[in-house]
Amino acid sequence: MAARTALIAIVLTASGPASAATLAVPFDFSRHAIELTANVKGKPLHVLLDTGANPSVIDLGRATALGLPLDRKAAGQGNGEGGKTTAAIPTVIPSPNIGGHDFGNVEALATDLRALSKSYGQPLDGVFGYSFLSTNTVLVDYPSHTLTIRPEGPNLAPRCRQRYDIPFTSNDDDQFPVIRNFRFGGVEAPVTLDTGSNRTIGLYRAAAEIAAIRNALVVEDVSGGSSFGGSYTTRNATLKIPFGIGPFMLPGGQDVSVMPGDGIPGKRIANVGNGFLAAVKAKLLIDYPNKRLALFGGCDAAKR
C-alpha cells in the first residue's frame, strides 16, 4: 500500500500574497493520493495535498538543487507514523505555480523524502499542507479527480443534494482536522481527517477500547507503510459494522487497517483517508481561512 504523509512537528505560517483567481485543475489519483504538479523557479515538482502535514514539506535534495534558503540553525525534527524522527530544516517554497496560477510563498520544512517516495511508487518532491491550505479555500472533487482552489474570499460550496458541515476543530492546536462524531455502528468517536492517507480508515489501539469496534474487527494479514517517521507495520482487517458521518456512510465489511500507534482515547481513535472519501463519492471543502469543513454528495447534475 502506498504511504501516507504524516504530521510534521514544527509549526510555521504561510506568507506572501496569493493570486486572486479561482483555479480548477485535475489531480492524479492513481495511488489514492491527491497528486499535483507545482512549478517552482520553472521546475516541475510532484507534490501531494495533505491535511495531515504541518506546515508543508519539500525534499531536501530538491530544495538544495533549487537554491532555496535553508535555515540550518533552526533545524528541528519531523516525525510520523513510523515513530522515528528525521532532520527538518525550515525553508520557503517561493511562489509555486499550479495550473498557470501563481500562489504566495509557502513556508515548509526540507527533509529527506527518498523512503517515502519509494513506498509511494514514484519520486515525491513535496507535500503541501497547512501552510498552503491556511491561505486558500480548496474543494477536492473525488468523483471527477478535480481540485478547485481559491484564495480566501467567496464561497466555493457546490450545489449538491447532500451536505454535511464538520465543526472546525483540532487536537492541541496541531491544525490536523478532527471529526468528533464519526460513527461506528451505533457509537460515535473522534477521528482525524487525512488527505495524505490512501487508506479507507486506519484504526489505532484506542479504537479497541470501544466494544462496538473491537467486536466487529476481524484482523487478517500484515501490511506495511512509510512516512516521515520511517517504515512501519500495519495489519489488514475487515470491519463488520458500517462507519461514516452524516449521510456519508459505508456498509459493514469494508477493508480497514490496524495502525501501530496508540491514538488518543477521546481525541483520536482512527485516521480517515482518501479511500473513504472516494468510496462515498464526496466533494470535500477545506476552507481553513473561514474555519469551515464540509462534505457534499449527489452533485452529478449540479453546477458549482
Image: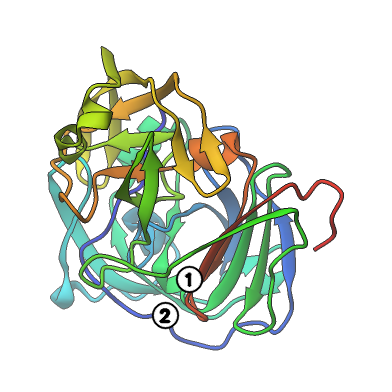
Secondary structure found at label 1: helix
| Amino acid identity at mark 1 | Phe
Q: Nearer the viewer, residue 208 or 229?
A: 208
Q: Does the residue at mark 1 contact the one at mark 2 (Cβ under 8 Å)?
A: yes
Residue at position x 22%, y 43% from top? 81
Q: Nearer the viewer, residue 283 or 50?
A: 283
Residue at position x 15%, y 49% from top? 265
Horizontal and vertical percent position of residue 70: 29, 73
Image quarter of the N terminus: top left
Asked if 172 appears above or below 60 in the picture, the reply is below
Check the image and name the residue furthest to the bottom. 17
Q: Which residue is mark 1?
A: 132
Horizontal and vertical percent position of residue 168: 42, 70
* Residue 218 sits in quarter: top left
Q: Is residue 54 rendered to the left or right of residue 133?
A: left
Instruction: Give the class, few, some or many, for how many residues have Cα within 10 Å of label 1's Cα (few <14, many ≥20).
Output: many
Q: Is residue 23 rendered to the left or right of residue 246?
A: right
Give the number of the disc on residue 248.
none
| Amino acid identity at mark 2 | Ala
Asked if 81 appears above or below 218 in the picture, the reply is below
Q: Which residue is mark 2?
A: 14
Horizontal and vertical percent position of residue 291: 47, 77
Residue at position x 63%, y 42% from top? 28
Secondary structure found at label 2: loop
Q: Nearer the viewer, residue 224 or 188?
A: 188
Distance from Cα at disc 1 to Cα at disc 2: 6 Å
Asked if 33 appears above or below 10 in the picture, the reply is above
